Image (cartoon, rainbow, N blue to C red):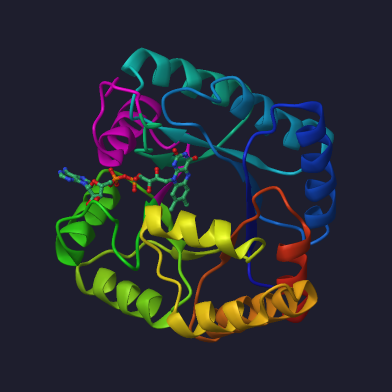
Amino acid sequence: MLPLSFEFYPPKTDDQRAQFDRTARRLKAFQPQFMSVTFGAGGSTLSHTPETVQRLRSDHGVTGVPHLTCVGGSREEIRSLLKLYRALGCDRIITLRGDLPSGMARTGDLRHASELVKLIRDEHGQQFHIEVAAYPETHPQAEDAHVDLRHFKAKVDAGADSAITQYFYNADAYFRFVDDARALGIAIPIVPGIMPIANFSQLRRFSEACGAEIPRWVSQRMRALGDDADGVREFASDIVAQLCRRLIDGGAPALHFYTLNLSKPTLAVLQRLD
Ligand code: FAD
């Protein structure tokens, strides 16, 4: 079976923790390679991310993997988190620049994810399997697609072991990105990030900010379905499952699901994939 991984954000309230536990329990049945926990750039989840990683490991018996961002943080803050993750037994880390919340001016000691990859490799050798982010539809702040690809290569040259992509709904963008990366000598696995569709208007807003394109035909069908909640769910699960099927048939090495801490949208896709 193709390796799967599931991404969560760290719950902060009792209600969120209950939802997180329910989702983790349901998705654990698919024997994921790991479940990862995002990190709020600028430190907004400083204690919640490690706590949640620990909760995955102790309460759910799954491999919990932390995300770590460098923007807004000092070298010392990053070093102490890495020390904590080693103490928790983590051997994989998702390494990112992050985006500072609007209004936060603190830039931090490291400017790009490649610098964070280098810091981890220099100070921890091969202790961590380092995952980085990749952008089949180009990072929104990049000068152009080629420059962005070279910055991706800088992360690999600094020591990244594998990559997870930003989500996308156009499989060709992923296949082309992988071909271009291979042509540039990037040999690491590039795992597609999959965003099941739970709330379409929220997804549209989010996609504008992170540079993911929602195909016009998908938006038009969603608009036509309007308030038909069952129809929307069926259609959304069908198109995401079809995307996954194409990615699997085209040689994707694994699938990483952005769960937003909800089980149903991800389960609906996985059930369609058997
Ligand atoms: P980088 O690789 O540093 O790239 C960011 C931009 O800078 C790109 O445009 C790149 O082309 C450019 N760049 C890179 N190097 C240079 C250079 N040397 N000179 C000039 N420009 C350069 N965000 C969070 O806050 N928390 C999370 O937990 C989180 N998890 C994520 C998980 C995944 C799988 C993905 C795909 C994204 C995640 N993000 C998260 C979002 C991510 O932090 C943002 O997309 C952020 O804007 C870029 O992060 P990066 O690691 O790709 O940065």
Nearest to the observer: residue 63 or residue 218: 218
Query: Percent position (x, y) of residue 196?
Result: 63, 66
Asked which quadrant contains residue 173, the reply is bottom left
Residue pictured at 32% horizontal, 18% vertical: 75
Asked which quadrant contains residue 190, the reply is bottom left
Query: Percent position (x, y) of residue 147?
Result: 15, 59
Residue pictured at 16% horizontal, 62% vertical: 144
On the question of residue 195 being in view, the answer is no
Q: Is residue 41 above or below residue 2?
A: above
Asked which quadrant contains residue 63, the reply is top right
Q: Quadrant of the C terminus?
A: bottom right
State yes or no: residue 120 in magenta.
yes
Residue pictured at 24% horizontal, 51% vertical: 141
Q: Is residue 2 above or below residue 39?
A: below
In screen coordinates, is 182 left or right of 1?
A: left
Query: Percent position (x, y) of residue 106?
Result: 30, 20
In screen coordinates, is 185 left or right of 49?
A: left
Residue pictured at 68% horizontal, 31% vertical: 52
State yes or no: residue 109 in magenta.
yes
Q: Quadrant of the N terminus?
A: bottom right
Query: Percent position (x, y) of residue 210?
Result: 39, 54
In screen coordinates, is 69 left or right of 23?
A: left
Bounds of the magenta span? 103-132
On the question of residue 89 being in view, the answer is yes
